[in-house]
Amino acid sequence: MPIITDIVFHNASRSESVEHLVRDRVGKLTRYYRDILNCRVVIDAPHHHHQKGNHYRVKLALFVPGKELVVGHGHKGSAAHEDLYAAVADAFTALESQVKTFVGKQRVLTIPHRRFDPGDVDPLYLEPDSEWEPYGVEYEDRMETCGAAD
């Protein structure tokens, strides 16, 4: 399913090739995280310089469940951002890094569930008069240790 991508050109002329590049880079972000809701891209040329050329700013906002990842790239003095394609590439590289960090934090917060085979028996669900004794400790001794005995 394609990600809804809003592309806004501010003080810059609309370009089909730049739009295609942006949509392609947004689509590639699904390699790292599939639940992306939408993306907003603002391409801005704040000042028109006749001698030094235009300097572009690219701002990205990527919306994922519960979070918004934001990147703003491009400064007046940065020669790399005189080229619009370089500004877009730098911004998406930074956003890619943020997505990887976000996914890494999600993995740390997700605790995997313990899986039981159908033949496994969980010692918490054994009856008190069961003959199963883990590690040689009887059921009553275990109950006294944890403070559950009456």
Image (cartoon, rainbow, N blue to C red):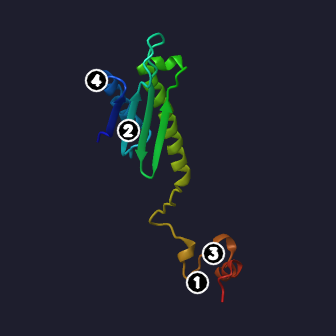
Dot 2: few (<14), some (14–19), or many (≥20) neighbours within 10 Å? some
Q: Quadrant of residue 145?
A: bottom right
Q: Position of residue 13 (x, y in %)?
A: 32, 22
* Residue that carries the numbered disc 3 in the rendered image: 133
Disc 2 is placed on an element classified as strand
* Residue that carries the numbered disc 4 in the rendered image: 16
Name the amino acid, label 1. Answer: Pro
- Quadrant that contains the N terminus: top left
Residue ranking furthest to the bottom:
150
Q: Earlier in the sequence, mark 2 or mark 3?
A: 2
Residue ranking furthest to the top:
51
Disc 4 is placed on an element classified as helix
Reply above or below: 118 against 106: below
Q: Earlier in the sequence, mark 3 or mark 4?
A: 4
Total number of numbered labels?
Answer: 4
Reply above or below: 134 against 147: above
How far apart marks 4 and 1 lie (CA) works out to 73 Å
Numbered mark located on residue 40 in the image: 2
Reply above or below: 21 against 109: above
Q: Earlier in the sequence, mark 4 or mark 2?
A: 4
How far apart marks 1 and 3 lie (CA) works out to 10 Å
* Residue that carries the numbered disc 1 in the rendered image: 128
Q: Position of residue 126 (x, y in %)?
A: 54, 78
Residue for point 39% across, 46% down:
35
Residue for point 48% across, 12% down:
52
